[in-house]
Image (cartoon, rainbow, N blue to C red):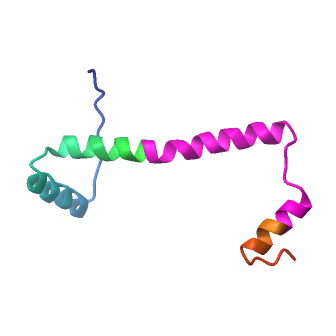
Amino acid sequence: MKSATVSAKLEPSVAKKLDLLAKATDRSRSFLVAEAIETYVKDQAWQIQAIQEGIKEAERGNFATDKEVKKAFKKWGVNED
């Protein structure tokens, strides 16, 4: 599998913790950083998709009614006034 190389600057305290984690898990810093980035990207991908879907709905004019908004506010204990 081909891979891309990236570099990042870390605060010294974070780099030290990364080194300790690498030693404790018998993994390289590079492996741990790649794993962390992969996890972050997967975790955040849903947000991008949800925003894009929301934009498409808005472009179609699909908005919540005032009644639906008030019901949601009431459910969460928010005063809409």
Q: Is residue 59 magenta?
A: yes
Quadrant where the image shows the N terminus: top left
**Left or right, 10 with reference to 55:** left
- What residue do we see at 28% from left, 26% from top? 3
Quadrant assignment, res 12: bottom left
Q: Which portion, as a residue range, is magenta? A: 42-70
Residue 53 is situated, as x and y percent measured from the top left of the image, at 69, 39
Residue 70 horizontal/vertical position (percent):
85, 68
- Check if residue 46 falls in the magenta segment: yes
Q: Which of 22 and 65 is in front in this view?
A: 65
Q: Closest to the observer: 78 or 9?
A: 78
Quadrant including the C terminus = bottom right
> In the rendered view, does 50 fall on the left or right side of 79?
left
**Residue at (87% x, 41% y) in the render:** 61
In the picture as drawn, the residue positioned furthest to the right comes out as 66
Residue drawn at (14%, 52%), measured in percent from left and top? 22
Q: Where is residue 40 in the image (x, y as percent from the top left)?
A: 40, 47
Whole-percent x and y of residue 76?
Answer: 71, 73
